[in-house]
């Protein structure tokens, strides 16, 4: 079983969100995402989810 490297986990999952409509991945501040201030670059929606960890 592979060991999880903390630096790699932070790079892949910290402050990363995925648009629920177009699946575009972007990094943003979690508080701004919760308040709805961040919009997707592609579709201009404000609905995001966190990435699924493998």
Image: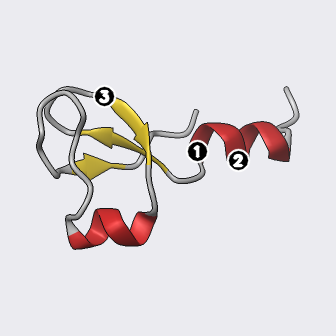
SS under mark 3: loop
Please give the residue where the numbered disc 2 appears in the rendered image: 10
CA–CA distance in space, label 2 to label 1 = 5 Å
Q: Earlier in the sequence, mark 3 or mark 2?
A: 2
Q: Residue at x 43, y 65 (%)?
A: 30
Image position, residue 1 (x, y; %): 85, 26
Image position, residue 39 (x, y; %): 21, 48
Image position, residue 14 (x, y; %): 60, 51
CA–CA distance in space, label 1 to label 3 = 14 Å
SS under mark 1: helix
Please give the residue where the numbered disc 3 appears in the rendered image: 24
Please give the residue where the numbered disc 1 appears in the rendered image: 13
Dot 2 surroundings within 10 Å: few (below 14), some, or many (20 or more)? few
Q: Residue at x 23, y 40 (%)?
A: 40
CA–CA distance in space, label 3 to label 2 = 19 Å
Q: Earlier in the sequence, mark 1 or mark 3?
A: 1
Q: Residue at x 25, y 38 (%)?
A: 19
Asked whether the beta carbons under mark 3 and mark 2 sit within 8 Å of each other, the answer is: no
């Amino acid at each position: 079983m592979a060991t999880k490297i903390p630096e790699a986990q932070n790079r892949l999952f910290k402050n990363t969100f995925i648009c629920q409509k177009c699946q575009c991945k972007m990094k943003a501040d979690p508080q701004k995402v919760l308040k709805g201030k961040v919009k997707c670059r592609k579709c201009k929606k404000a609905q995001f989810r966190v990435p699924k960890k493998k």
